[in-house]
Amino acid sequence: MTKTVPLKNLAPNITKVLQSIPGDNNSLLLNKQHYYQNSLLTSWCERTPHPVTLRYLANFGKTLTEEKIISSANFVRTELPVRLALRIRDLQKLPFNFTNNFHISQVYQSYYHCFNAFRKIGHIDTLKENEDFCKFLSSVLDDHLLILPHLMMGALECSILQNMKQSTLDDLMSLMLRSRISRRVIIEQHISLSRSFSSTASDNTNSNTNGITTNTNTTKPSNYIGAAFQYCSAIEHLNICKDITWNFLSRNYPDLQMPELIINFEDLTNSNSKDVKFQFLTNHLDYILSEILRNSLKSTISNFLKNRDLSDKLSNKPPPITVDITNNKKDIIFKISDRGGGMDQDQLSRLFSFGKSTVLAKNYLNNFQKLPGLNLTPRFPVLDENDSKVVKNTGEIIEENKEVQLSGMLHSLGEMETTNPNNKSDIRLASSAEIGQVEEQLDDIFDNKHSISPVDPYKDNKLIQKSALRRLVNRPLEYTLGISLPMCKVYIDYWNGDLNVYSLEGYGTDVYLRLSKLGGSGDKVQLDKA
């Protein structure tokens, strides 16, 4: 016989369950009215992003003029809100219990405020307006540094709850990461072009009180693909990543000799060459190489300590890790070989998936939360409009509350649909002083006072921009996150490369990394991955 329970008796339990569901109950964006009745977003989603290749950007930037800089600024101004709108719509199509996850909701809300800020910026007509626009773009790059850790932690929490198929989660993460790369490269390229033009123009008109002339142009070499890309030495960057990883482990095992890293190089285009330099994003390259080396080193040490003969005093040095680098006309190929015991076929089949078992996801998430200096307390720029602690309607900062400064920055640029997008006075681009406040806040989020790595090759390199990937590279070796190789796979695929792993259980693993030389004649459309 079925027993009927009055609804009023169940109410307290229902309330408890609802309150326990992660998410932002005070959000202005995660509600039915904004979520499903937003005609503004729909109109932007109907637009088509413009396919862009690195070669196109390179050709565009080889000879710089004021007209080209202004044209580039307006391309970024109109292209970015389209790309952001498409990702927002993708998140809206997902089950609400996924998007309402705390970390994913931060991504959603940050994207919407950024979209809203971009769409209100009027046509850019002068170099001074472009200078202000570049300051705004820099603040966007800084503000979105936390997107990456939020995506990663959101994926792990999704795995714990098992509320999305593994294949669906993999496709979503790949889409979000590829889109993020595209947007950041487009922004960084424009900022770099603007700085290059401004610097050259200033040098050429040093005696001119105005500092810039409209006749100035700069010409780049034939193999130039953009100022955001640096010439990277394969061997130098491999050693940089090795030093970071080896130093962490040497602190954990002070009495153990570190494995030797043997580097072999062969250039199929020049038999006399001892190294190869190629254009790449340094933070992407170092992240990829570091994560592969971390895995090889950890497995090598673990397998060595497990099987070594303690009676043999000479057996205190693990076997070497060997890297064979081959350069050809179109690619650079790295083969990283270790004797770390290998892995079974089940592990191998799940190596590049963001979806994890509940137990593993909990362990990885726990490691993520223990990362030195990672502070996710400062929220993304999502605040109630009645929150008087942060901004006026004009965007002026009233009170500097350390926990909400970062949130206030883009909120002041991305107020809800209350202003006229055709009126330039409706949006105030971030000032230099405010950009400085954001930089200081980011230093608190990824606290530089924490011990990160005894070797930081970037600290004196002002060309290196803030990067969430850089922070992940510098994490202590014991913090395994479980989704680093899947992320590497996405980054490598994005740049038309390839990553394959072959393992012999009980012996070791070979990793084959192929990086395409960017900007070649066979350049694929990469930046259309909106």
Image (cartoon, helix red, strand yellow):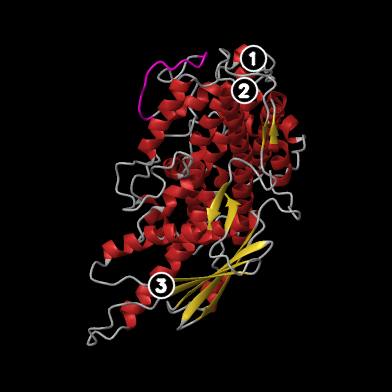
Question: The C terminus lies in which quarter of the figure?
Answer: top right
Residue tagged 3: 299
Element type where label 1 sits in the image: helix
Q: Mark 3 or 1 closer to N-term?
A: 3
Which of the 4 image quadrants contains residue 397? top left
Q: Is residue 246 left or right of residue 426?
A: left
Type of the residue with mark 3: Ser
Residue 424 badge: 1
Where's residue 155, x and y in %? 52, 53
Residue at the (47%, 50%) spot, across then down: 153
Question: Which SS class for mark 2?
Answer: helix
Amino acid at pointer 1: Lys
Residue 356 appears left or right of 305: right
Horizontal placement of 56 versus 505: left or right?
right
Q: Is residue 229 magenta?
A: no
Tell me which residue sits at (72%, 31%) in the image. 44
Q: Nearer the viewer, mark 2 or mark 3?
A: 2
Point 37% across, 56% down: residue? 367
- State which tag comes first along the sequence, 1 or 2: 2
Task: Give the residues in magenta.
Answer: 393-403
Disc 2 marks a residue whose amino acid type is Asn
- Does residue 412 sit above or below 225 in this rendering? above
